[in-house]
Image: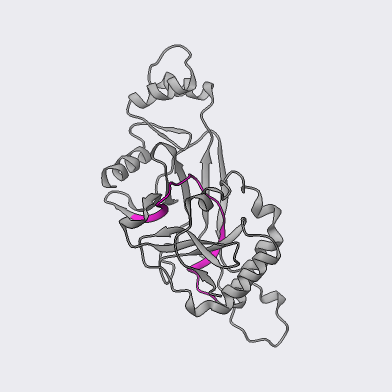
Amino acid sequence: MALIQEGFVSADTYNSLPTIQEVADVPQEYAADLEHLQELLARHNVPESISIRLIHRHYDIADGDAMVFRDIALPAHGTVEVMRATPIASAQLHGKNFFVSSTAQLQAYEYTTETTVGLSEYETFIAEFVEIVVQRKLQHKFGLKINHRSEMEVKADQKEFEFPEEQCTITIPITLPLPEATHEIDVDTDWGAVDIQHKRKRGKTKPRPRPSSTRTTCSHGGPAAPEDCRGECAKEGHGGPAAPEDCRGECAKEGGILFDGRIVQLGTPFHGLLNNLMEVW
């Protein structure tokens, strides 16, 4: 049986994957399993473009769609990565994030428009990875992420934000201006090889594994509390208490943008980035 399952993941299967909120504690609760998988990366000396992925979804998809990542160059801000549901037939897509399916095969569940690193030369690693995931019942916890660069070009840590109003996520290098939030939860979502030099027997001459050079987190700002929202509205000159949704709507009328539970005010650097992004995409 082939190690990698061909074809696109069905909407039913994708929509059954856990949300990021449901797996937020998995990296801590299954830390020993995660470290074992990271050591597997090191033992097989796989490139940095292959890493361990926390299995999660942000939104549901419809039949005939897939969640697709694509890079968008912003003239004033550099490059950001956007993920949103896209018709399968609309573009040439390549697997980016993979889970281990019920048939004990790697199955892509999220895709990219960029050509990804080929996995055929890493069959021994994939076979062992799949075996470990099945044995330890980690199918809905850890998978693989395949970067679309043969070598990691982006050296800055990144944060992935949800943009519910546009049903997409935006991954931004932390070197770019980031929005502030009164309540925020960061969850690490991918990991590279760990240094297992100290575990090797004396006299071994295997090359030292390369640790992951970047860190990717999902950042989630909770809905603004009424008092926070009233405070924001007060800055804009609105009077009297209002329901949170009404207050956020009023703030948006002043040129603000609702983003990941935050109100991004007009004139802030991140407001400019979002405006630039929506003009381009």
Coordinates of residue 190 in the picture (x, y in percent): 55, 59
Q: Determine whether 200 is above or below 63 in the image.
A: below
- At x 45%, y 60%, the residue is 8
Residue 196 seen by the camera: yes
- At x 49%, y 80%, the residue is 121
Which of the pair 188/30 is nearer the observer? Answer: 30
Which of the pair 33/4 is nearer the observer? Answer: 4
**How many labels sit on residues?**
0
Q: Which residues are magenta?
A: 46-71
Q: Is residue 115 left or right of residue 107?
A: left
Q: Is residue 234 left or right of residue 227?
A: left
Q: Is residue 60 magenta?
A: yes
Coordinates of residue 106 in the picture (x, y in percent): 54, 66
Coordinates of residue 227 in the picture (x, y in percent): 53, 21
Q: Is residue 158 magenta?
A: no
Q: Quadrant of the N terminus?
A: bottom right
Which of the pair 207/124 is nearer the observer? Answer: 124
Q: Determine whether 246 is above or below 138 in the image.
A: above
Q: Is residue 227 left or right of residue 236?
A: right
Q: Quadrant of residue 136?
A: bottom right
Instruction: State the scheme by which the image is colored.
Output: one colour
Coordinates of residue 109 in the picture (x, y in percent): 49, 58
Which of the pair 228/278 is nearer the observer? Answer: 278
Residue 209 seen by the camera: no
- At x 44%, y 74%, the residue is 118
